[in-house]
Image (cartoon, rainbow, N blue to C red):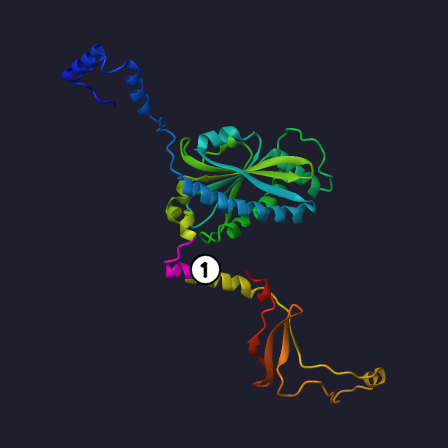
Amino acid sequence: MADVLSQSEIDALLSALSSGDLQPEELEKEEEKQKVKLYDFRSPQKFSKDHIRTLELIHDNYGRIIANYLTAQVRQNVKVKIESIEQITYEEFIHSVPNPTIITVFKMPPLSGSVLFETNPQFVYKIIDILLGGSGDSKYKAREFTDIDKNIILKINQGLIANLKLAWSDVVEVETEIENIETNPALNQTLAPHEPVALVTFSVEIGESHSFIHMCIPYLSIEKILDKLVVQYWYQENDDEVIVESQNRLKNRLNIVDVPLMTRLGNTRITVDEFLRLSVGDVVSLSNKHTDPVNVYLNGQLHYLAKPGVIGKYMGIQILDIIDKDVENYD
């Protein structure tokens, strides 16, 4: 509310105007400086810029993940790109999607409440056409979805939603559980009309066609983990627990990678006739001495020098030195 001037202040202002000490233009400039920003209490801005930025990072990665998933499903090159993420009300989201459409309602514990995943009819019919043996180039015609359509797209959406676990793994470990699907947005009363939600919009490019899918994340669902939806949370250097957890997660991901390891004991030269006469128990003399280190190769590249020996009842090697072939390329 603006300040109310007293009678003495009004008299002083009129006196300054009449004497020329204060010009009317100066009053207008003062008023321009005190602009009021409108705020709609029916649609409060509960998502901060940091929250929106973090959600954008998560779902930008999610777009790349589901692009690979869809490419494998339809055997065509699929591109998925995040177009926008904004805060709107649930009512605005419901009015923005077509009818009929496919809305998959699912839960994502430990997030509370339900999350909505809307697949545009153009996307749905394109996927169904390809999966049923078509080329996917048929024109889209608005019609009601059959039970067969729903079952086919439900299988696809199960895979799309399941990939959220991988996209959210850097923030929080989540699980996904599909509750039901709806075709009429007006019948879905999951939230109150004015409940704030984050609407994530993806564009999907399959061949020459473009369509959209949307994800509606209610504020109530992520309210408990808001402290983790800050970019700085990912890079806290002073939190030992976060560093250890990050290192363990990185180590676990590296441990599942198979790397071919080969040890070369030495070299020798024999004739073809000698090679053909080799049999079990023959001894082949190598160029190396038994005291010389052996070369260890990773992916065909020399990386280590090692000493051969016996570990229990198995043959093994002991690493003696690391050969860094890329040291000359370091800045």
Query: What kind of residue is marked 1?
Result: Ser
Residue extending furthest left? Answer: 8
Residue extending furthest front? Answer: 20
Q: Position of residue 178 (x, y in %)?
A: 52, 46
Count how many numbered circles sit on residues in the image.
1
Q: Position of residue 258 (x, y in %)?
A: 61, 66
Drawn side of residue 94 relative to residue 275, left or right = left
Asked if the magenta segment contains residue 86, the reply would be no
Task: Give the structural element (helix, strand or loop) at label 1.
Answer: helix
Q: Position of residue 317 (x, y in %)?
A: 59, 80
Residue drawn at x 41%, y 47% as measured from the top left: 230
Residue drawn at x 42%, y 31% as measured from the top left: 193
Front-lying residue, 33 or 229: 33
The quarter holding residue 25 reads top left
Q: Quadrant of the N terminus?
A: top left
Which residue was labeled with disc 1? 246
Q: Rate crowding at label 1 as few (under 14), some (14 to 19) or many (20 or more) other CA atoms within 10 Å.
A: some
Q: Position of residue 128 (x, y in %)?
A: 67, 40
